[in-house]
Amino acid sequence: MLGQEMYEIRRIADMIVKARKVVVFTGAGVSTESGIPDFRSPGGIWTRFDPDDFTLDKFLSSQETRRKQWELLLEGGLFKNIVPNKAHLAIADLEKIGKLDCVITQNIDGLHQKAGNSPEKVFELHGNMRAVRCLDCGRRYSIEEIHSLGFDPEKIPVCPRCGGILKPDVIFFGEALPQDTLTEASLHASNCDLMIIVGSSLVVYPAAYMPQYAKQQGAKIAIVNLSATPMDDTADAVVRHSASEAMDAIVLEVKKLL
C-alpha cells in the first residue's frame, strides 16, 4: 500500500479504538472479492439476464420468469461454494474484540454470518439469497432445503407445506425493503459515533441513506472503496483500495492499539 493509504488506514484504526459504537455498512465491493458478480457492472447479472425478470410483478405473473429464477438459484451456481474473504473476516474480528455495534449490508449472500458475525448483528437491507419464503403461508426455508427436493427444469418448486409460490427472500424491483430491518438499521446508524463504509458506491437508495443518518447525528465517516463516492468530500477518512486488503490492514492496526 502507498504511504497515504497507510496513513488513512491508521487514522481509521484510531477512530475505531476511540469510538463507542462502530457500525459497518457494506456493499457489493465486499462480495465481488469472494467471486460474486456485481449486478450492475460489466459482466454482471444485468448483462446476462433480463432485469425485468427481477421485478416482483413479473415474478408473480410469469411462470417462465419463476422457472428462470429457480434455474439461476439451484443450478446456476451463483452463490455455490462461496466463502468469506479477508474483508468479511476482518469485520467479524471487530465483533470478536468488542468494537462492532452492527453490520448494515446491501449484500444478499450471507457471508457476514458465515465469517462469524452474529446473525442478530447483521441487518440485511436487501434480504438473503440463501433463504426462500412462501408467499402464501409465510414459511421460510433455506436454499439447501429446497435444493434437497431436487430441481426439475420443467417444474417450478412450490412450498412443501402448502403448495404456495416460493420466492427468494430478497428484495425485487418494485418491492419495499423489509420495514422492521430498515427501522432497526436506521436506529443503529443514527446512534453510532463511527460508520465505516466498505465496498459501496452509495448510489442505491434507500440503503444509501444510512451513512447520511450517521453523518447528520455527528458520527465520523470512514470510506473504504475502490471508486469515488458521493460522500468522499465530507468523510473523515477515505481509503481507495480493495476492501479485503484495506479492512485486513485496518483491523491489524486496531489490534496493535488495543
Image (spheres, helix red, strand yellow):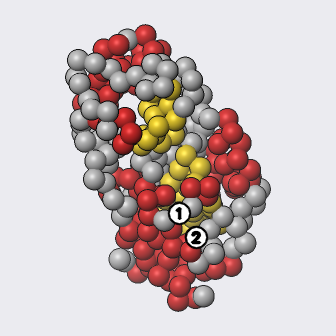
Q: Nearer the viewer, residue 147 or 239?
A: 147
Mark 2 and mark 1 in contact (Cβ < 8 Å)?
yes
Q: Name the disc covering residue 231, or none.
A: none
Q: Is residue 201 left or right of residue 24?
A: left
The amino acid type, in three-letter code, at marker 2 is Glu
**Sequence-earlier tag: 1 or 2:** 2
Q: Position of residue 201 (x, y in %)?
A: 47, 48
Q: Which residue is mark 2?
A: 95
Please say if 6 is above or below 147.
below
Task: Tell me the crowding category of disc 2: few under 14, some 14 to 19, or many 20 or more residues within 10 angstroms, Cα based.
Answer: some
In this orientation, does residue 204 appear?
no
Q: Position of residue 140 (x, y in %)?
A: 52, 35
**Distance between the alpha carbons at the discs numbered 1 and 2:** 7 Å
- Which corner quadrant holds the N terminus? bottom left
Q: Position of residue 239 (x, y in %)?
A: 46, 67
Image label count: 2
Q: Is residue 42 left or right of residue 6?
A: left
Q: Residue at x 45, y 51 (%)?
A: 110
Q: Nearer the viewer, residue 102 or 138?
A: 138
Q: Which residue is mark 1?
A: 117
Q: Is residue 98 left or right of residue 81?
A: right
Q: Residue at x 54, y 31 (%)?
A: 139
Query: Which residue appears farthest toward the top when viewing the image?
Result: 61
Please say if 233 is above or below 21.
above
Please say if 79 is above or below 75.
below
Write down the quadrant of residue 114 in the picture: bottom left
Q: Nearer the viewer, residue 19 or 88?
A: 88
Query: Which residue appears farthest toward the front when viewing the image?
Result: 161
